[in-house]
Amino acid sequence: MNRISTKLTVYFFVTVLIMETSLMLYLHKNIINSRTEEEFNRLLANGSNHRDVLTAYFSDTTMKHIVLMEKDGDREVLITNASGEIISSSNEKGERLQKYLPPLETINATEDQILYADWKDMPYIISVHPYHVESGQTGYVIMFQSTASINHLVAKLNMHFGMAGVTSVAALFIIYAFLSKFLTRPLIRMKEATEKLSMGDFDVSLPAIGKDELGELSGSIQKLAGDLERLTVERNEFLAATAHELSTPLTYLNGYSKVARRQGIQEAERNRYLDIIAEESERMKDLVNNLLDLAKMDENSFPVTKEYFWADSFIQHVIKLVEPSFGIKKLDLELELEGDFRIYADPLRLEQILMNLLDNALKYSNEASVVTLQVFKKEDKTVFIITDRGIGIPEQYLPFIFEKLYRVEKSRSRTYGGSGIGLSVVKELVEAHGGSIEVTSLLGQGSKFTVTL
């Protein structure tokens, strides 16, 4: 019972078996009841006709005709008088038929009726029809209908219903074969694919199996394999890049600290070495902070404490922080602030968002170009738009730039100093505020990031 095809077959078989058994029992019972009701009505109708003829034309000749009509068929007849004596019979004066009757003198019927209806255990169903002749003669016309035809019908029904049951079981096994081929085999392939993924083998290929739920599941597993493979490559590249980034400042720190400790070195040269050490220490600090941000993203631990503050003073503070870096690269930072208004956000986290986006614009902008920061109110939300005229982002990479560790064109990203963390942090912080971030870009013409909080 561990295979889904077996479970489906068992459940399907039990369900169909219950439905089919209930339906067959219902049909079987109703067919037999209908057939026996038909026999009862026919028997009553024939007995009533004989009684009417006998009443209208009572004579020995009439009784002989009645007996002759029912002789050598599946019906037989007895005619009695008021004292219960058999005065005419279709069978040897009625001795053989009489044994299926109660004592004739005890029969007390006032109208046509079925005397015995037990067709299962009796060879006959029996009806009784009282007659009254004007001359004073009374008695009964007693009709016997053989139950052989009913029993034959029941036997045929049992045979046909049994054949239907066997056919149903065979059909279920055929359905099982189809289920195994068209349903469970794709599921088994998906199970094997997920096992390969769990062992780190991302070379998974699943066939297209339609647009139903199985097809969607197959496509999702295929996409998951691609995403896991890409994330593994990104992780390895990131770790290699991180090791490289750490090794460079560590080498400088180690080397220049030894040089700075030398005896007899001039003070100006010593200070230059100390400045290099301080610069490389800042690089390491920035990298470690990025790694801490990455760890927080994995733990979903970006706390946000919102409050109201004025836009003008906040934006001017951010501008002062980044102006030196823009000046070194000879970039103009243009601010477009539509009046002073209050912003409802976490000022520390919002500063982190804008600093990351401005730093991103700084890294990927050409020298002597312009970066624009627009801030304005739209209904009850605040919109920040950062536009650069830098190298831009290829269209095929746009859906992935907010993913952790993702860097556009890895070699170029290393050249421009990207670590694949900054934009991921921005997206997490924006979503923690309940906001949204969008990006548009043209290769060689620049990028525009729009944050709405």
Image (tube, rainbow, N blue to C red):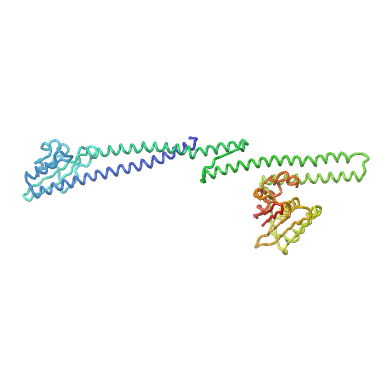
Residue sitting at the far front? 444
Residue 397 or 56: which is nearer the viewer?
A: 397
Where is residue 156, by image quadrant? top left
Where is residue 18, by image quadrant? top left
Query: How many circles with numbers are drawn on the protein?
Result: 0
Q: Percent from the top left, x then y, of residue 195?
A: 58, 36
Q: Give left or right: position of 305 versus 203.
A: right
Which residue is at a point 76% across and 52% down the rendered structure image? 366
Q: Percent from the top left, x then y, of residue 385?
A: 70, 57
Q: Percent from the top left, x then y, of residue 216?
A: 54, 45
Which residue is at a point 77% across and 55% down the rendered structure image? 369
Rendered position, 231 above or below 431: above
Residue 174 or 272: which is nearer the viewer?
A: 174
Q: Which part of the image, by quadrant, shows the C terminus?
A: bottom right
Q: Give left or right: position of 154 versus 261.
A: left
Where is residue 198, by image quadrant? top right
Residue 198 or 352: which is nearer the viewer?
A: 198
Residue sitting at the far right? 264
Residue sitting at the far bottom? 339
Which residue is at a point 74% across and 41% down the rendered structure image? 242
Q: Percent from the top left, x then y, of residue 432?
A: 66, 52
Q: Give left or right: position of 107 versus 156.
A: left
